Every structure is written in C-alpha cells, then in structure tokens.
Image: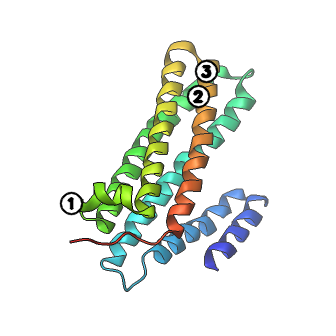
Amino acid sequence: LVEVNAFAVAALCARSRRPATALAPLAAVVVAEALRAHPPAEHTAYLGSALTVVHLTCAALWAGGLLHVLRTLRRWRTTAPGAGAALLGLYARVAAVLLAAITATGVCSTLRRMPVSTVLDQLVTTAYGRTLLAKVILVAVVSVFALAARGRLRHRGLGAAYVPARAEVAALGAVVAVSAVLTALPLPIRWS
C-alpha cells in the first residue's frame, strides 16, 4: 500500500511545477520494497534490505538516466550535437559505476539466498533460479548494447550511438519486467 500511494504521489509531483519533489516518494517506494522483500523474521533482514535499496536505486538511476539522456539527445540532435555527445559520454561513465554496484549487490543478494555450493544447481532447478538466470542474461545483453552505443559514439558520432542506446532502454525494460516476476516467486530453498 505504501508503494502504490508513493507512486501516486510521485506522479502528481512529476506533473507539478516542481517535478524534483517526486524524488521523496520514489525513495519511499525503494525503501518500502526493500523492507517488503526482507521481512524481520528473515536472517540478516537489515543487510538484505540495505542491499536491495542500493540495487534498486542504482537500477532506477541507470534506466531512468538513460531514458532522460535519450530524450534530451532527441531535442539536441540538430541544435547541439556536441553537447549531446558529451552528455551521453558522461552518462556512460556514471552507468559503468551503476552497473558495477548493481552487479555487486545482485551477487551478494543471490549468495544470501543460495549458498555458493548450490547456486549452479538452483539456477537450473528452481523457478526462482531460472528467472534469476534470465535476468542475468538480459543484463548481459543490456551491457552489450551499452558498449556498442559507447563504441559508436567514440568512433562514429552521436547519430550512430542513438540506435544501440535505444535498444539498451528496451532491454532494460525487459530486465524490469523479469525482476517483477522474480519478486513474486518463492525464494529458493537454502540447501546446506
């Protein structure tokens, strides 16, 4: 209920004269999801919640930042292509740090739920594991699109980078969809 209400407030804030006020309710969504995903009865629930807060925040910044950059590039395509290329280059550096944080928190979260000795087995034998594997593959695809966009930006200019960057946004949407499915699945069995 907190998440639904916070999304509604964020939507109202985004349409107001001060759209930056939407950050507070969106932060509430992230914290509420982290607490929902790690109930107090869970072993090391606070650690799990902290990992989820960092993971979700970085993921939102990566996907939302790229979408914003692409919208800005569309407006600047003819008026300020040099500034657009610089913006995409700056975003690429930030996105690399965000990807590293997402990867680190994702690995730590996985190892909290699946002991190292059982990860490979559970990735193919449980619904949670197969969905997690699909998410990892999609993130790898997103990373390939990101590298292609950055390579094209460096060697062929802004126009060539736009197409793989748009594909990156679409693939990030698929990652979000798979992540939503992942949160609805029962947690894997903690085998000893």
As shown in the figure, which amino acid type bears the numbered disc 3?
Leu
Q: Residue at x 52, y 71 (%)?
A: 33
Tell me if residue 94 can be seen: no
| Nearer the observer, 174 or 50 | 174
| Nearer the observer, 33 or 117 | 117
The answer for how far apart the CA atoms under marks 1 and 2 are is 37 Å
Closer to viewer: mark 3 or mark 2: 2
Mark 1 touches mark 2? (CB < 8 Å): no
As shown in the figure, which amino acid type bears the numbered disc 2?
Pro
The mark nearer the N terminus, 1 or 2, is 1
The answer for how far apart the CA atoms under marks 3 and 2 are is 11 Å
Mark 3 touches mark 2? (CB < 8 Å): no
Question: Which of the 4 image quadrants contains residue 72?
Answer: top right
Q: Which mark is residue 171?
A: none
Counting from the top left corner in percent of width and height, residue 59 is at 50, 52
Q: Residue at x 57, y 37 (%)?
A: 168
Extreme-top residue of the structure = 156
Residue at numbered disc 2: 164
